[in-house]
């Protein structure tokens, strides 16, 4: 990826963006993919038995497989969360419940 792949920098060439933990800037390829999904496949997954819901669910499973392959994991090990903070809290909760963490342990993110 290059800076030229991100449309925001075309509109704001002097922008130096350091807030990616809150909101990441999107490259044009991602914007195009989201637009394509919203126009063609926008439906809830795991809830519908109509064609676009089934297509959405298949795309969801394909995306988990791609991420899993990228990091050499199983798709069942991939969990999508609302944001980074929520994801980190899920990890800490799971570690605490399984007694991997003890009182006084420190977590650095």
Image (tube, rainbow, N blue to C red):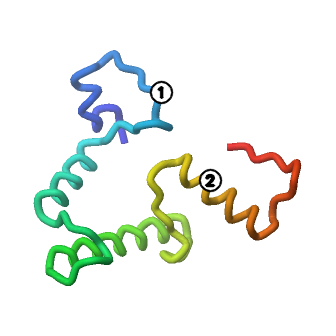
Residue labelled with disc 1: 18
Residue 31 lies, in percent from the top left, at: 23, 46
| Quadrant for the N terminus in the image | top left
Q: Position of residue 8 (x, y in %)?
A: 27, 29
Residue at image point 73% right, 43% down: 108
The residue under the point 24% across, 33% down is: 7
Which numbered disc, 2 or 1, marks the residue closer to the eye?
Answer: 2
54 relative to 12, above or below: below
Residue 32 appears at what percent x and percent y? 19, 50
Q: x%, y% of residue 19?
A: 46, 30
The residue positioned 22% from the left and 23% from the top of the image is 11
Residue at the disc numbered 2: 89
Taking depth in this image into account, of 90 and 69 the one nearest to the observer is 90
Q: Nearer the viewer, residue 33 or 44?
A: 44
Q: Quadrant of residue 58?
A: bottom left
What whole-number distance in Å separates the C-alpha atoms at marks 2 and 1?
A: 23 Å
Quarter of the figure that contains the C terminus:
top right
Residue at left offset 11%, top offset 58%: 39
């Amino acid at each position: 990826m290059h800076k030229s792949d991100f449309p925001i920098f075309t509109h704001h060439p002097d922008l130096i963006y350091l807030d990616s933990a809150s909101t990441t800037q999107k490259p044009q390829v991602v914007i195009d993919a989201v637009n394509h999904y919203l126009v063609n496949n926008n439906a809830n997954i795991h809830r519908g038995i109509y064609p676009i819901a089934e297509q959405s669910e298949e795309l969801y499973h394909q995306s988990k497989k791609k991420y899993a392959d990228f990091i050499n994991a199983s798709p069942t090990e991939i969990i999508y969360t609302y944001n980074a903070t929520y994801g980190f809290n899920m990890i800490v909760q799971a570690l605490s419940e399984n007694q991997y963490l003890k009182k006084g342990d420190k977590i650095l993110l």
